[in-house]
Image: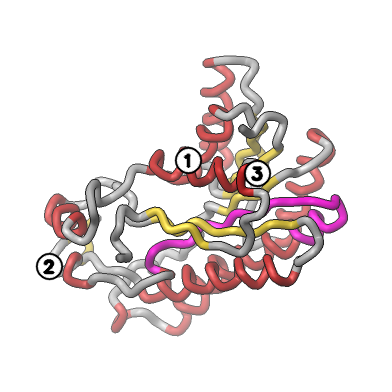
Amino acid sequence: MLSNKVVIIAGGCGRIGKSFVEAIIENKGICIIADIDVNSGKNIVNLYKSKSPNHSIDFFKLDISNKLSILEIIDSTVKKYKKIDAFVNASYPRNKNWGKKFEDVTFEDICENINIHLGGYFIAAQQLCIFFKKQGFGNLVNISSIMGVGVPKFDTYEQTIYNGKEMTSPAEYSIIKAGIIHFTRYIAKYYSGCNIRCNCISPGGILADQPKKFIEKYRKYCLSKGLLDPEDLKGTLVYLLSDASQYLNGQNLIVDDGWSL
């Protein structure tokens, strides 16, 4: 479905990003892993190349909060592959104090996280869309979350410790992810008539060694599986990147096993 399509995956070394890389390779696309983690990025490329030298996969360093870094990856990709069909932003930047309870979040932390996360999505989309307009076509896919669609179910976190801290759903996460969804609509409308599409995926919770207590509480709000594996998002991404969705624009696709119902 993605034959000859050049797709950049920002955050391609992350939990969701790696599954997206796999989806593009499986569907014969040309995958550019874009991440600030150079060692992990190169290791992923080497892993695929060791399986088959015919895999079309590459790595370029990217910091989505840095305009120059974004311009450099656009330039490097075009020089090597002559075009960019799509840019998928699966990056998840956050500072060291991310994940504190609402009462403990400082003004400095909320500003920093909005700047690097939502601001990073903004500057990346801005520069890619400028390029897409010059190119004459382009496809942008943002990754939000169900926490940008509905409010957290706080009872699922009560009295549960994860990675040494009391679990919560960070307020800044909800603010940022809601912003990404609306920003997606803004871009789609702003570039009306320019042959540029912009859509969003809002995943449910992703399984990541959370405590059994939390997993069981979370599943009660879902219809079947509960927490998702990253691989469960691959089909939605491939659809958005393929020509099958050519008239889908400005939409937020929720993949959450019914959590948001």
Measuring from the top left, give residue 212's x and y in whole percent: 14, 50
Side of 229 where 163 appears, left or right: left
Q: Nearer the viewer, residue 124 or 129?
A: 129
Magenta residues, as a range?
129-147
Q: Residues within 10 Å of mark 2 (few under 14, many from 20)?
A: few
Side of 3 where 173 appears, left or right: left
Q: Which residue is mark 3?
A: 8
Residue 50 makes an appearance in the image: yes
Measuring from the top left, give residue 140's x and y in whole percent: 65, 54
Q: Residues within 10 Å of mark 3 (few under 14, many from 20)?
A: many
**C-alpha distance separating marks 2 and 3:** 40 Å
Circle nearer the N terminus (2, 3): 3
Q: Residue at x 63, y 60 (%)?
A: 249
**Image quadrant assignment for residue 83:** top right
Q: Verify CB contact (< 8 Å) between mark 1 and mark 2.
A: no
Position above or below: 246 against 19: below
Q: Which residue is mark 2?
A: 159
Q: Residue at x 61, y 64 (%)?
A: 250
